[in-house]
Image: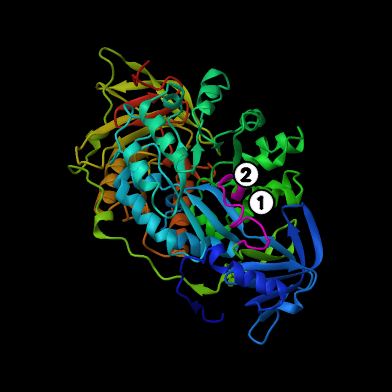
């Protein structure tokens, strides 16, 4: 393998800075930095594949796209023969959370660039829930140092549901207004407090107004199947897109109301197949549909891909390949008001493109960003300098005291031999849960689990302020058959610690170990540590290379399977059990939450 090119990355020149150069190159008065010849131009504006096309690049932008760029070739021009392969715009991820990859922005870029992703729109509301505005700024600054385009959305809901959870920080209209002045803020992150928007909550109204006044895009998150008046009130409140749909009717409803329907395929969310039928079967205009990942585990990034995986999947559902590519390029750029910057191969745009040998299979041979080849045949060719996080972003896990098995005891209602309890029901490959009920045994005043019927315990351990508080409940769907416990400080969105287990001693051991290493995710069984992914940055991200994190994550996955769990990407399901803005039943630091009512409920029925 050739040595990687050491490169310093700077913010690309604006179009106005290089426009005279682009005109001169297009006219042949100056020579291009790079010319790619004899390609098949995948034109996402016209929906055509145009054979025998040359593209000329200067100043990091496309200057000429046409049948013959020989007039732009000079002594210093690098010439690449596409040999009839396809020239495809660099892929865009319209909505995602870097922290879900368990790595930093830099490491995320290292992992996804070989898969053709050249633009990302990230919502760092995970780190915001731990470190507040400081955390957003840290990721914003890291994003600007990358060789590809990483735009940042200002988190809108910290905490996600005021009154139903307490995060490590709180943000409001004042902070949103401040962030809108930052260079790399592209809009407002997903507005998860959909009841607040529909109720004209002052905080939500103020944040959305500040974003609109700044001319930025307002991200949506309507996680409810109710398409009646609450949905209409939410749309009227300003959100411009939504990725929480799971049914074709969800996508149709959003598009009809002028929103963009974002169809996601993450590590554990499989919502493209059902919703893309709105295009393939109902014939809706595909210009208003966008592909995204939302949450991608490090193992998925390293092994299966990123946006290339989503595009392939969309094509497999019956989409025309060009339409699928439009949904991952031009549609995204237009939505964020960046059509003149990216999302297509056309003059003036940043020279982010792929050379692809098989369009339907999206076989990516080469990846270019701003006119520089970044990867070839799945291997990164550049060395992206490491990014260091300050001490203030570490040591954020504060347990208050060393936990013991008794901290996970659940006292039964007085005088009962059996207790009917609410149980969080995990749904494979979906973010929503089910609100289940189960009759559980009582011994010596303590409610037990029911492993035979797949009911084990879940606990949320407060970790931001060191109160030592533990909220206990029950969960079903993981299928654990052995004595075990898994703990994680990634617990969307408040990011306390979630512990799920069949054995209370293991639950305590797992929680204490995470406190010791500063956060992450861990599996214990019978007092033995089976797998650990350390995430010392805000308890959310590792400072190791993506490949190393993926190996550790794979060990964790194997450990979960060995304990009886057969769920696809069960870690991602585990991490959402405290997400009190997605129905039906969740756990938070204030108790058990019924998200269909947006209210705390008793554990026992």
Judged left or right of residue 39, residue 456 is: left
Q: CA distance from mark 1 to mark 2?
A: 10 Å
Residue displayed at 30% across by 45% down? 132
User: Measured from the top left, where is residue 396 in percent x and y?
Assistant: 26, 49
Quadrant (top left, top right, bottom left, bottom right) of the N terminus: bottom right
Name the residue that disc number 1 marks. Answer: 311
Judge whether 82 appears above or below 160 on screen. below
User: Measured from the top left, where is residue 86 in percent x and y?
Assistant: 74, 64
User: Measured from the top left, where is residue 575 in percent x and y?
Assistant: 42, 42
Name the residue that disc number 2 marks. Answer: 290
Decide: few, some or many residues near mark 2? Use Cα within 10 Å; few <14, some 14-19, many ≥20.
Answer: many
Q: Nearer the viewer, residue 559 or 200?
A: 200
Decide: few, some or many residues near mark 1? Use Cα within 10 Å; few <14, some 14-19, many ≥20.
Answer: many
Q: Is residue 132 visible?
A: yes
Q: In terms of secondary structure, where does tag 1 sit?
A: helix
Q: In terms of secondary structure, where does tag 2 sit?
A: strand
- Main SS of the magenta part reads loop
Quadrant (top left, top right, bottom left, bottom right) of the C terminus: top left
Judged left or right of residue 406, residue 197 is: right
Residue displayed at 33% across by 42% down? 175
The residues colored magenta run 333-349
User: In the image as oriented, which residue stretches furthest toward the left?
Assistant: 401
Mark count: 2
* Sooner in the amino-acid sequence: mark 1 or mark 2: 2
């Amino acid at each position: 393998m050739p040595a990687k090119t050491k490169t310093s990355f700077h913010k690309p020149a604006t179009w106005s800075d290089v426009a005279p150069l682009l005109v001169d190159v297009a006219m042949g008065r100056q020579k291009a930095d790079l010319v790619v010849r004899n390609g098949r131009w995948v034109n996402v504006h016209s929906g055509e594949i145009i054979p025998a096309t040359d593209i000329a690049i200067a100043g990091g932008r496309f200057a000429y796209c046409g049948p013959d760029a020989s007039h732009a070739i000079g002594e210093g021009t690098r010439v690449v023969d596409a040999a009839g392969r396809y020239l495809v715009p660099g892929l865009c991820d319209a909505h995602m959370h870097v922290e879900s990859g368990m790595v930093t922005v830099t490491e995320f870029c290292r992992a996804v660039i070989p898969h053709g992703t050249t633009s990302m729109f990230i919502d760092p509301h995970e780190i915001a829930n731990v470190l507040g505005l400081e955390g957003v700024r840290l990721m914003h600054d890291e994003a600007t140092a990358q060789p590809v385009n990483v735009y940042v959305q200002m988190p809108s809901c910290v905490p996600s549901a005021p009154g139903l959870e307490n995060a490590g920080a709180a943000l409001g209209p004042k902070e949103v207004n401040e962030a809108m002045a930052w260079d790399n803020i592209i809009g407002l992150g997903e507005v998860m407090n959909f009841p607040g928007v529909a109720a004209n909550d002052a905080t939500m109204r103020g944040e959305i107004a500040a974003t609109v006044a700044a001319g930025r895009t307002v991200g949506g998150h309507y996680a409810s199947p109710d398409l009646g008046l609450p949905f209409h009130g939410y749309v009227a409140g300003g959100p411009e897109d939504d990725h929480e749909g799971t049914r074709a009717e969800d996508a149709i409803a959003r598009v009809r109301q002028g929103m963009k329907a974002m169809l996601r395929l993450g590590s554990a969310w499989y919502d493209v197949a059902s919703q893309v039928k709105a295009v393939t079967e109902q014939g809706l205009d595909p210009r208003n549909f966008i592909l995204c990942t939302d949450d991608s585990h490090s193992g998925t990034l390293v092994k299966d891909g990123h946006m290339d995986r989503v595009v392939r999947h969309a094509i497999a559902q019956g989409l025309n390949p060009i339409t699928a590519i439009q949904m991952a390029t031009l549609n995204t750029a237009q939505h964020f008001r960046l059509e003149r910057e990216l999302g297509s191969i056309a003059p003036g745009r940043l020279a982010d493109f792929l050379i692809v040998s098989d369009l339907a299979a999206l076989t990516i041979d080469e990846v270019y960003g701003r006119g520089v080849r970044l990867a070839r045949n799945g291997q990164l060719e550049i060395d992206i300098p490491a990014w260091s996080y300050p001490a203030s972003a570490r040591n954020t896990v504060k347990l208050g005291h060393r936990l013991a098995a008794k901290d996970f005891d659940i006292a039964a209602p007085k005088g009962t031999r059996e207790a009917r309890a609410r149980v969080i029901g995990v749904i494979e490959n979906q973010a929503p849960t089910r609100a289940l009920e189960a009759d559980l045994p009582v011994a010596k005043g303590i409610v037990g689990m029911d492993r035979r019927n797949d009911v084990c315990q879940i606990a949320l351990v407060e970790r931001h302020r060191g109160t030592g508080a533990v909220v206990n409940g029950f969960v079903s769907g993981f299928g654990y058959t052995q004595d075990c416990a898994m703990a994680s400080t990634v617990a969307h969105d408040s990011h306390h610690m979630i512990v799920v287990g069949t054995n209370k001693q293991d639950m305590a051991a797992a929680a204490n170990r995470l406190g010791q290493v500063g956060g992450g995710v861990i599996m214990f069984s019978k007092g033995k540590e089976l797998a650990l992914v350390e995430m010392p940055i805000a308890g959310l991200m590792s400072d190791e290379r993506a490949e190393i994190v993926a190996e550790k994550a794979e060990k964790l996955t194997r450990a979960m399977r060995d304990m009886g769990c057969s769920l696809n990407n069960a870690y991602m399901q585990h991490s959402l059990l405290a997400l009190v803005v997605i129905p039906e039943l969740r756990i938070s630091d204030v108790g058990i939450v019924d998200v269909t009512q947006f209210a705390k409920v008793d554990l026992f029925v």
